[in-house]
Structures are given as C-alpha cells and as structure tokens.
Image (cartoon, helix red, strand yellow):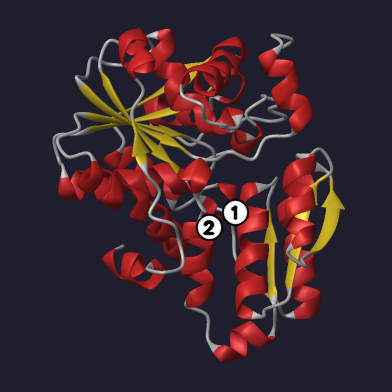
Amino acid sequence: MRDAQARLAGQSVLTPVLTCEALDEQAGRRVFLKCENLQRGGAFKFRGGCNAISLLSDEERSRGIVTYSSGNHAQAVALVGKMLGIPVTVVMPQNSSATKREATLSHGARVIDCEPSEREAVAARVQSETGAVLIPPFDHPDIIAGQGTLALELHEQAPGLDAVFVPVGGGGLISGVAIATKAVNPGCAVIGVEPESGDDAARSLHSGTLQTCEHCMSIADGTRTRSLGKLTFPLVRRFVDDIVTVSESEIAEAVRFLFQRAQLVVEPSGALGVAALLSGRCRPASRAGVVLSGGNVDADVMARILTRQV
C-alpha cells in the first residue's frame, strides 16, 4: 500500500479532510470527512484503477483493458486509459447512472450495455475474444492497495481517530481502508455501512459465511454488488469491526444534510457513513472519520432528494 501511495503521487488528488459544526452537533462527536467526492473522476475509484493499470506491462497495455462497473470504477478506468493511451472497454448495466455513463464515454471508452446480472459474464466474453486485460472493480490486490491509500492520508490528516465509517459495496474500499487503519492506528474501529436493501456484507460478516443479495435497487447505486469478493470477504472478516445498515430515507437525508449544511455534493453511496452517524446506527466514538466515497450523482436524482421525493 505504501508502494501504491508512492505510485499515485502526482496522479491522484490528496483530497481534503473537512469538518462541519452542524454535523458534529447532530452526530454528538467530532467528525472528519475524507472528501473523495473531490478525487479525480469524482470518486475514490481512481486510486485503485490507476494503481492497478500503472502496474501493467507494455505488452499487457497493448492488448487493451476491459472492466465491468455500474459507474465510478468505469469512469476511473476510462480516465486512466485515456491518460496512458490504453484502449478501454467497459461493460455497464443498462440501469447505470446516466452521469457516470456519460463521463465514461467522454474519456473515450467503448461501453457495452448488459443486464445487471450479466456484467461479469459479458466482460469475460470480451476478454476471451479480444485478449484484453481484465481490471475488476474491487476483487484484486492492486485495486485494494490503491483504495487503501486514502486511509493512509486520512490518519495523517486527522490523527487520533477512534472510528472510521466506510461505504460497502464489493468490499475493495473497506478492505483497503481497514488494512491501512489497523496498521497505523490499531485501536481505531472500522465500521462498514450499506443499504438495508443490499445488506449482504453485514450478513456475511455477522454469519461468517459469504451471503448474496440479488437485485438490490437502492438509491446508493455504487453498492449494487451481488456479494463481497473472494479476496475482500476474508479481509473484511479479519479487519472490519462491524457493518451496519441504513434505510433509503436515511441515505437521502444524509445527502441533503451534506448539500445544505456542509455545501458538499455527495452521491447516495458516498453519504452512507454520514447516514449511519445521523441515524445513530453506530458505536460511540469521540473522533470519527467518514469516507465520502464519491460525488457523481445524476441531476434528476439530486433534485428528487432535495425536494424530498426520496
């Protein structure tokens, strides 16, 4: 992970850690917001994508890249491919965010539509037909190492945290954050947060067996993964202290709060940690770090949230 941090120097943004008095008052503790919504590509995914792709050989780069993603990983890989001159093909579910789809296309990637349940199979077919290198969205050691660099920054920017709240989808982000946190601040609890309607990670951690969630349609579209991965599941079991869930209305309220009180545009997936704090679904902590994982939200979705239609 330290190697990844050095590799990303000058490529990724050292995102700020911000505070908000109104949030401190509502949450009853000091809260430090790690603003990955201000990262290149609008989300933490740039870190893992850039780290993994930077490690490819010249021969691998010449074959191109294929990935599958509902959005933030898609545009991160497309952006890195554009930076390095590597052709990128992205398999995206048909119900992906329009904003994320447009950004992916704007970086020059070829986008292939698919049903949400078919993205891995379609990507595998493209890989077989073209010889492209697969850069998966979360279940890859170089992706996990890249994502964890934000936690190395966070603990330097806000030392002495006793808890860190992290959104959970496929587990790449929370695995990297948890590994880094337990290395540099072993007493700090790592708490995952996911939607109630997509609670596979919480059930997996609490049961000790890998659980799945089919057809999650949460407003937090970045968490619509079927399950944790073969790599991320054991890492979550080893390094994550707890995973809590929040309702759709609580997620929407967190997005509104960040927009209206902290002047931050954060997508629903990125606001999960704040939702956990505002709803009280968390363990006591006097100094809490929260990863705002992304800010790529469709205008119509934000409008519905701000007008309380969600």
Pick the quarter of the image with the N terminus: bottom left
Pick the quarter of the image with the C terminus: top right
The answer to whether one can see residue 89 in this image is: yes
The answer to whether one can see residue 116 in this image is: no
- Please give the label number shown on residue 41: 1
Counting from the top left corner in percent of width and height, residue 246 is at: 51, 16
Q: Secondary structure at mark 2?
A: helix
Q: Is residue 71 left or right of residue 189?
A: right
- Please give the label number shown on residue 263: none
Q: What residue appears at the point 48 percent right and 17 percent down from the top-left corner?
A: 261
Q: Around disc 2, counting alpha carbons within 10 Å, would you say few (fewer than 14), some (14 to 19), or many (20 or more)?
A: many
Q: Is residue 261 above or below residue 56?
A: above
Q: What residue appears at the point 57 percent right and 90 percent down from the top-left corner?
A: 58
Counting from the top left corner in percent of width and height, residue 294 is at: 54, 40
Residue marked by disc 2: 46
Q: Around disc 1, counting alpha carbons within 10 Å, would you say few (fewer than 14), some (14 to 19), or many (20 or more)?
A: many
Compute the Cα span from label 1 to label 2.
6 Å
| Amino acid of disc 2 | Phe
Q: Secondary structure at mark 1?
A: helix
Residue depth check, mark 1 versus mark 2: number of the one nearer the observer: 1
| Sequence-first tag of 1 and 2 | 1
Counting from the top left corner in percent of width and height, residue 242 is at: 33, 26
Pointer 1 and pointer 2: residues touching (CB < 8 Å)?
Answer: yes
Figure quadrant of residue 137: bottom right
